[in-house]
Image (spheres, rainbow, N blue to C red):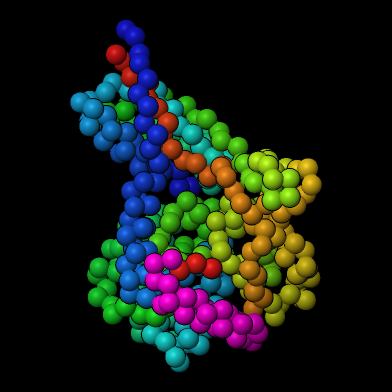
Amino acid sequence: MHELSIAISMIDQIVEESESRGGLAVEVVHMRLGIFAGVDKAALLFAYELACEGTPLQGSRLVIETVPLVVFCPICRQQKTPPSVYEICCPECLSPTPEILSGREMEVASLEVTA
Amino acid sequence: MSTRIVEVRAKVMKQNDLLARTLRERFQRDATCVVGLVSSPGSGKTAFLEKLLAGLSRNYRVAALVGDLATENDAARLQRATPNVKQITTGTICHLDAQMIEKALKEWKLDAPDFLFIENVGNLVCPSSYDLGEELRFVLLSATEGEDKPLKYPTIFNSSDVAIITKMDLADAAEFDVAMARHNIESVRPGMRIFEVSSKTSLGMEAIFQFLQTQRTRTQEAPLEAAL
């Protein structure tokens, strides 16, 4: 359960970002979370709410967009999504696909703020 | 009241990743080959590390940082192989992060070793998110845990560089299917280098020493782009 540590780093970062822009009234935080980031979405949503208490982000809402796993198939020479996170191969030709293009993201994409 | 959107696009792990990069540059400058060890609790990380330290200390300066929630038992055990061992007790935290490594190194005042091993807290989930500045990450899987561990924890296997199957002396007794385990590792991390070892009988340790020696030569020769 490292989602609480992650929520705290994320909040610190958003507060810093907000202060650098003269203090924003953040209502919604939009985040992109890769399916291969090793972070549980439900646990992070729960941790976020807890970690927000007593910070300028208290009362804000976290919205998580799940980023699928995308690999490069060296045989088809195309981007593909593997059958599952434990079968890292091309869904078409079944070749192993060591090159991962996305799916590990853990980033704050944007903030919805009161104008 | 109206709302507006502010684009941010910032990595959540930015602080950790920046610190990890600083550590990595420092290790490369010092020509220290740094290897992280991750596994579930009880898969034999400490026994394996004991063998590594004992074997490599014949020709190299070795050191180890060991993470646990509580106790200094592992450090005391490893000190039989080298005095250069430091325990990091994390309290309730289930993983090591770059800041803990930096702090431990600062307090330690250790002359740059040839090899530094960082034994993470026993956990196959959380450590995968934290870059510690290591050059290589070894993930350990013991023969007694079952062949499907890699499929259950794909993220940590995929974020590691080398897989070590430990407790191979118990493979027959545990009816461990090593071919299936290798197949499953390959499925979550195509092309991953795999070693089979027994820390008890020393089976397979020589191959690891050779691999690490080669890696160390690479660390020295290409200090700014050491890679597998």
In the rendered structure, does residue B218 fall within the stretch colored magenta?
yes
Q: Assign the C terminus of chain B to one quadrant of the image.
A: bottom right
Q: Is residue A90 left or right of residue A9?
A: right
Eyeballing the image, is A35 above or below B190?
A: above
Q: Residue at x 67, y 75 (%)?
A: B196
Spot the residue most to the front: A77
Spot the residue most to the bottom: B58
Eyeballing the image, is A59 above or below A97?
A: above
Residue B222: image x %, image y %?
Answer: 43, 72
Q: Is residue A11 visible?
A: yes
Q: Residue at x 47, y 83 (%)?
A: B53
Q: Dividing the picture into quarters, in which one does residue B167 lie? A: bottom right
Q: Dividing the picture into quarters, in which one does residue B44 lie? A: bottom right
Q: Residue at x 56, y 83 (%)?
A: B210
Residue A58: image x %, image y %?
Answer: 32, 27
Closest to the observer: B15 or B71? B15
- Report the span colored magenta: B198-225
Residue A24: image x %, image y %?
Answer: 26, 23
Q: Is residue A40 visible?
A: no
Prevalent SS, magenta region: helix
Q: Is residue A22 left or right of residue A1?
A: left
Closest to the observer: B186 or B141? B186
